[in-house]
Image: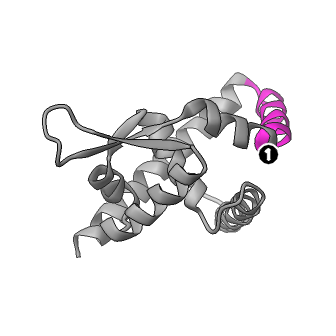
Amino acid sequence: MNADLIKRVRKLSQQHAYTSIHMHETIARKAGFSGTDHKYLGFLLEKGQMTAGELAGLTGLTTGAITGLIDRFEKKKLVKRRFAEDDRRKVIIEANTENIMALFEPLYRDFRKETESIIASFSDKDLKVIEAYFLKAIEVMSETTNKLSEK
């Protein structure tokens, strides 16, 4: 293995993460959010609905912080609360996919188009390598998060 190349790729990975954070912070501000609040909508979009407790578990936020987050989303009509049919003490948070997409699609449109073009410029063989890297990197990040969450 070429140690210098490994170091350069590792540095690029860090730079990619930092640039991603900066871009998402900028998008959040444009959409009227602070910080990474808007990224938590992704959890809701992916699952469609979940309890506030489930969202707290996924984000690592306290239930109090989740209540504030949901209040902000609800005010913008991006989510709605409803009671679970089997237990009225349980509140289900439902994503309003149409409103979320209407808010964020214009902000991500150029980015999505350009990244899809970059991805399409690689061979299938190259894409398999990139895919393998991301799958393994996600696994390592998830394991690290789980280990640190246990302490």
- Magenta stretch: includes residue 115: yes
Q: Quick one: 115 or 45, which is closer to the camera? A: 45
Q: Is residue 89 left or right of residue 6?
A: left
Q: Position of residue 16 (x, y in %)?
A: 71, 60
Viewer-proximal residue, 62 or 140? Answer: 62
Task: Where is residue 150? Give x, y as percent.
Answer: 22, 69
In this rendering, position of residue 90 left or right of residue 112: left
Residue 147 rendering spot, x and y as whole percentages = 28, 67
Q: Is residue 43 above or below residue 144?
A: above
Residue 23 vertical placement versus 128 (above, below): below
**Majority secondary structure in the magenta region:** helix
Horizontal side of 79 relative to 49 (left or right) equals right
Q: Position of residue 122 (x, y in %)?
A: 78, 30
- At x 13% / y 40%, what residue is drawn? 87
Q: Residue at x 56, y 43 (%)?
A: 78
Task: Say which residue appears at 43% left-offset and 33% top-offset.
Answer: 48
Q: Is residue 99 left or right of residue 44?
A: right
From the viewer's side, name the closer residue of 26 and 19: 26
Q: Which residue is mark 1?
A: 107
The amino acid on which the numbered mark 1 sits, given as a three-letter code, is Leu
In this rendering, the count of numbered labels is 1
Structural crowding at the residue carrying mark 1, measured as other residues with C-alpha within 10 Å and reported as few (<14), some (14–19) or many (≥20): some
The residue most toward the left is: 86
> For residue 62: magenta?
no
**Residue drawn 67% across and 26% down?**
125
Q: Which residues are magenta?
A: 107-123
